Amino acid sequence: MASQGAPTGVDRVGPQELRAFTLYLMEKRCFSGHRFTRPQERGLSGHTINCYLRSIRPFFSWLVSERIIP
């Protein structure tokens, strides 16, 4: 997010940033940035993208329960 100029503070992340993150994942190539495996032409699978997004909800729920964000 920082490389795209988007806010990185959890109190400043909203639906627009989450949509941008989803689009980023949809465009990302499989194994891009991996230390030991060359990037492939295919993108991330829908399952992989869904796993990323499923992990965000409990994290934000935890932030709310800890009163870090409203």
Image (cartoon, rainbow, N blue to C red):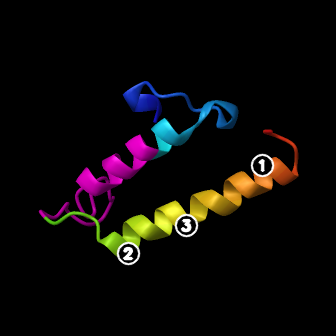
C-alpha distance separating marks 3 and 1: 15 Å
Residue that mark 3 sits on: 54
At a point 38% along the width and 29% down the height, the residue shown is 4
| Kind of residue at disc 3 | Arg
68 to 30, vertically: above or below? above
Among numbered discs 3 and 2, the one appearing first in the sequence: 2
Magenta-colored stretch includes residue 29: yes
Residue 61 appears in the picture as rendered: yes
For disc 3, the neighbor class at 10 Å (few under 14, some 14 to 19, many from 20) is few
Q: Report how many numbered discs are placed on residues in the image.
A: 3
At a point 16% along the width and 66% down the height, the residue shown is 42
C-alpha distance separating marks 3 and 2: 10 Å
Residue that mark 2 sits on: 47
Q: Secondary structure at mark 3?
A: helix
| Kind of residue at disc 1 | Leu
Q: Secondary structure at mark 1?
A: helix
Q: Residue 44 lies in what quarter of the image? A: bottom left
Q: 7 and 38: which one is in front? A: 7
Q: Position of residue 26 (x, y in %)?
A: 28, 56
Span highlighted in magenta in the image: 19-41
- In contact (CB < 8 Å): disc 2 and disc 1: no
Q: Position of residue 21 (x, y in %)?
A: 42, 46
Residue that mark 1 sits on: 63
Instruction: Report the side of 66 relative to 26 (left or right).
Output: right
Q: 1 and 50: which one is in front? A: 50
What's the magenta bit mostly, secondary-structure-wise? Answer: loop
